[in-house]
Amino acid sequence: MKFTMNNFFDIGYDKLNTRISVSTLGGTHSYVIHFFNNAVKKKNGYFDYRDFSRKIKDLKEFRESSDYDDVEITIDKSQKAKEYATDIRQYIQRNFKR
């Protein structure tokens, strides 16, 4: 996602790191997620934003749960996470390219 911010939005990595460091959103992940949610909403409207942001939220919750909680990661959960990650990547590739 940072690559897309650099190449599609012309935000260099140094500038991006500066923005993240002064942001009140809570770090790199939160800043990048917030940035893309706003970009999707602006470019494609509320319905795309709602779907995109839900997938990002669900994927982030899965990652945090699998990293920090003592939970069993089932095949179904991991396949759903992979599906969300693929959907997010494909959406970004379709909608944010030069």
Image (spheres, rainbow, N blue to C red):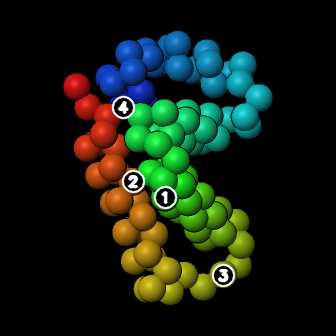
User: How far apart are the alpha carbons under marks 4 and 1?
Assistant: 19 Å
* Rendered position, 13 above or below 84: above
Quickly name the residue at label 1. 51
Question: Any mark on residue 88, and which?
Answer: 2
Q: Of the residues shown, which amino acid type is indicated by label 2? A: Ile
| Residue highlighted by disc 3 | 71
How far is disc 1 from disc 3 in space, using C-alphas? 26 Å
Q: Nearer the viewer, residue 31 or 38?
A: 38
Q: CA distance from mark 4 to mark 2?
A: 12 Å
- Pointer 3 or 2: first along the chain: 3
Q: Which dot, 4 or 1, sits closer to the camera?
A: 1
Marks 4 and 3, the one that precedes in the sequence: 4
Q: From the image, state whether disc 1 or disc 3 is nearer to you.
A: 1
Mark 3 and mark 2: span between their CA atoms? 24 Å
Upstream in sequence: badge 1 or badge 3: 1
**Label 2's element?**
helix
Residue 56 appears in the picture as rendered: no
Residue designated by label 4: 4
* Residue type (three-letter) at the residue carrying disc 4: Thr
Dot 1, crowdedness within 10 Å: few (<14), some or many (≥20)?
some
